[in-house]
Amino acid sequence: MSATRVALVGACGKMGSLIIRRILATDGMALSAAFDLVNIGRDVGEVIGAGTLNVPVSDSKDLSSVLKESKTDVLVDFTVAPATAANAPIAAAAGVNLIIGTTGLTAEQKTNITQAVVKNNVAAVISSNYSIGVGVFFKLIKEAARYLGDGYDVEIIEAHHNQKKDAPSGTAMTAAEIIGKEMGGKDFVFGREGVCPRGKEIGIHAIRGGDIVGDHTVMFIGNSERIELRHQAHSREIFVGGAVMAAKWVVSQKKGVVYEMSDVLS
Ligand SMILES: NC(=O)c1ccc[n+]([C@@H]2O[C@H](COP(=O)([O-])OP(=O)(O)OC[C@H]3O[C@@H](n4cnc5c(N)ncnc54)[C@H](O)[C@@H]3O)[C@@H](O)[C@H]2O)c1
């Protein structure tokens, strides 16, 4: 069987460069192309310190032609929301499957990407968190929300490194959506300042500092007790493994569908 050919957008970034290294080390996968805003024309292997790979960093304005020429099966995108919103429909129109890790996409941006996936009959995985542990964490908070119900207030605290651009994290938002769906009728309140009596809400708080890879704590707070569920990422490798697993998986799935990481894990 021929190797799954994977291209990266955000190839020179923290996640992109780790994913390229993992692809190179994975049987049955090959790096087909690399895109970024920086280092255009340079060999991506040399940029990320992985030796010469004979794959140049391309400008994403050439996305469609480079994806076709390089016979890419899957495009993995870990960039920023406006870039993903622009690039994902172009890749779908080029017949390329998608793995999207970029966080901070609006509902409208996600809808546009979904429409492009359906229209062009490709498959995609969109996940705010590719870690297997976070998949289990989501299941646990869903279960807790189901048992605890309205007598418990919910607060979510997330902490990330000082380079992270969006807040709150996509994972915190996914956690809030899961709990909101289970408990029903919850508003989201982002931080608090001034007079702000607590309502039927989920409070969401973002901490930014140093090199924290990603911590998420969900607190269910009752009148004489509280439960805290926490996931702490020690290294970006947990997201890398999940994203590469998803890239391998997505090529053989039914087309015209946007999947979640829970589909990959199940
Ligand atoms: N889903 C997950 O599991 C997960 C895990 C970690 C990070 N993330 C998300 O992935 C994204 C990237 O994170 P990072 O830590 O690698 O950031 P980073 O800043 O280190 O890397 C982003 C890269 O994207 C490039 N880029 C920006 N705009 C571009 C464009 N228009 N075309 C091509 N390249 C472009 C940048 O030049 C940079 O090299 C963020 O949204 C982050 O929240 C998701």
Image (cartoon, rainbow, N blue to C red):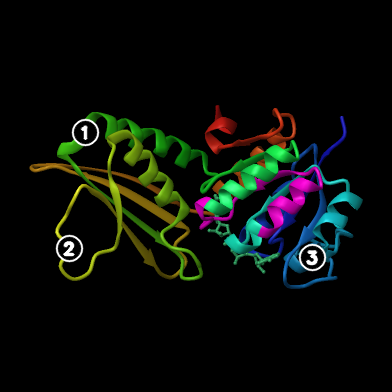
| Vertical arrangement, residue 265 with respect to residue 190, above or below | above
Does residue 104 show up magenta in the picture?
A: yes
Q: Residue at x 65, y 62 (%)?
A: 83
Q: Residues within 10 Å of mark 3 (few under 14, many from 20)?
A: some
Q: Earlier in the sequence, mark 3 or mark 2?
A: 3
Query: Is ligand 1 less than 8 Å from the beta carbon at label 3?
Result: no
Whether residue 169 sits left or right of residue 250 in the image: it is left
Q: Which image quadrant: the N terminus?
A: top right
State the residue position of label 3. Answer: 61
**Residue 72's x, y, as percent?**
83, 46
State the residue position of label 1. Answer: 148
Q: Nearer the viewer, residue 185 or 179?
A: 185
Q: Is residue 102 visible?
A: yes
SS at mark 3 in the image: helix
Q: Residues within 10 Å of mark 1 (few under 14, many from 20)?
A: some
State the residue position of label 2. Answer: 196
Q: Inspect the image, locate mark 3, and give the three-letter code of the amino acid beneath it.
A: Lys
Q: Residue at x 51, y 48 (%)?
A: 128
- Ligand 1, by image quadrant, is bottom right
Residue placed furthest toward the left: 224
Q: Residue at x 66, y 56 (%)?
A: 18
Q: Inspect the image, locate mark 2, and give the three-letter code of the amino acid beneath it.
A: Cys
**Residue 138's x, y, as percent?**
41, 38
Residue placed furthest toward the right: 69
Q: Inspect the image, locate mark 1, and give the three-letter code of the amino acid beneath it.
A: Leu
Magenta stretch bounds? 86-107
Are discs 1 and 3 less than 8 Å apart at CB? no
**Residue 36's x, y, as percent?**
73, 66
